[in-house]
Image (cartoon, rainbow, N blue to C red):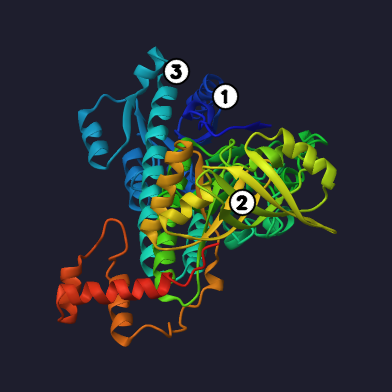
Amino acid sequence: MTETADSVSPPTSQRSISVLLIDDDETWARTQRRLLERSHEHLTVSTATSFQAARDALEATEPDCIVCDYQLGDGTGVELLAEVRATEPELPFILVTGQGDEAVASDAIGAQVTDYVRKMDLGKQPTGLVRRIETAVQADRSRRALARERRSKEALLKAVTASATRSELGGVICEQLVDSGYACASIAVLDDDRGVVPLAAAGDTDYLEAAITPGTRPADCTEPTLRAVDETELVVHSLTPIEEIKTESTNWEQVAVAHGFGSAAAVPISHNDVYFGALTVYSWTPQIDDREQVLLTEYAETIGYAFQTAAWKQTLLSSGTATVEFALSNGCHPLLELAAALPENPTLHVTTVVPRSDHEVLYVTRLEGVAEATLSEIVETTEMIVSIDYHRTNDAIQCGLVVESPSPEMRLVDAGVSLFQTVVDGRHARISAVLGGENTVNGCVDVLSDLYGEGAVKTLWTTDEATMSRTEPVANLTDRQRQVLELAVEAGYFERPRHNNTGELADALDISRATFTQHLRAAQRKLFGSGIHR
């Protein structure tokens, strides 16, 4: 079994190539077939010895390349070429002839032959035909891949334009990926507890039901979807035939191989450093090549843009609240050291964060499964914790942990968000906050990056659209405020790059720019001003 994020597609010389060799000289056809197959271990050659036999063979199967003699007894290679081009304009077709007639070459070129070679030249260079076949097939496969990529991107653009919700968009995209040849495609998003839940899927979805439990994300699971969400980077995994899987292999691999999958790739869905989940495909083939990886990454980036745009619009027009989660690691939170040192890896739930002075912050924290004496002992050895006060020690310990500044929570409050909760385990500190708009979120990322360094923070969108009201009116907005806000959203005012300025939108409503701005700011204050700072 191999696992890498840098899988490389095998070159054409290592991929199977099927060839239909057509010649009315049975001896030459048999000899050339043996020569081709001996010269290239991945060539599979079938033969036809007449024009009609070639027609029959092409009705039964489509080879990767046709090698055809000019004289076929009951027809010519140029005539067969014309028939092939009527249905397959790009299929590699190499014409072989014993004649050096320029008129034959001219007719073949006019009929769009791929290549033209004389038998006498092949006699001088026995492997020359193999190289011509390889070159023609490689060019055709590259052309087909580019055409599929172009069609996929056009279909993706239509899906993004036409879909009203994340679920609709995800469903269309998964169907497209399965139609393009993947065995299964899925889009998974994060729930409020950072578990992975399916948003959309297509193809062999029985695998997903068997291998991934919704709402969970085990830390030791290597399933590509879960890894991509956890590591926020591309994950490519090649699978081994089931008889070779060892007992220590994870269960998802056995399920995947049992379903006939050969490989999988998962890409995190994000936009502007806000992460929503992962796009995952499962392939029948043993490898997902570089071109596919690039295309999947572009898909995920486009999905991320669409998700974030929909999320901002939904937040602005909904009476509910939406949250994001800032995930910190590598010692970037004052309680991470404590969580890592505690036995049994308990989770610390911070319910309140209160500044005590310019230099100290109080974390009101709850945790289970740890004795008071053990907690006190470990706190004494933790550098950033100044003291601990116990409030309750029955079924769970509730205590106040005083830590030295700086506190990421206080920096986020200063940046304009309302804190919801902080959850700390031995690996991450996850700070959930109520949204205050796109600029607020980007500002928070900048603040935390300045405090802990680039790459120290990941922003995760954790509220599913099902929890957000799409139609319930915002009671405290005036009619004009709602009208201004809806126009701004629909016109792309909150997108980046901004599609319209306030002057253009004010003209659309026949009001002054100052009046438009006043109503817009008032609406935003009402929508985002209801969060409670803790």
The numbered disc on residue 127 is 3
How packed mark 1 is, by other alpha carbons closer than 10 Å (few <14, some 14-19, many 20 or more), is few
- Direction from residue 212 to residue 303 in the image, left or right: left
Residue under the point 34% across and 28% down: 97
Q: Residue furthest front?
A: 357
Q: Of discs 2 and 1, which sits in the foreground? A: 2
Q: Which residue is mark 1?
A: 41
Residue 59 visible in this rendered orientation of the protein: no
Residue 153 locus on image (x, y percent): 37, 53
Q: Quadrant of the C terminus?
A: bottom right
Name the element at disc 1: loop
Q: Quadrant of the N terminus?
A: top right
Q: Which kind of residue does numbered mark 3 sit on?
A: Thr
Gap between marks 3 and 1, in whole Å?
13 Å
The residue nearer to you, when weighing 292 against 445, is: 445
Q: Which kind of residue does numbered mark 2 sit on?
A: Leu
The numbered disc on residue 362 is 2
Residue under the point 70% across and 47% down: 256
Instruction: Please report whichever mark, 3 or 1, sits nearer to the chain's N-terminal start.
Output: 1
Instruction: Please report whichever mark, 2 or 3, sits nearer to the chain's N-terminal start.
Output: 3
- Direction from residue 245 to residue 222 in the image, left or right: left
Residue 131 locus on image (x, y percent): 41, 23
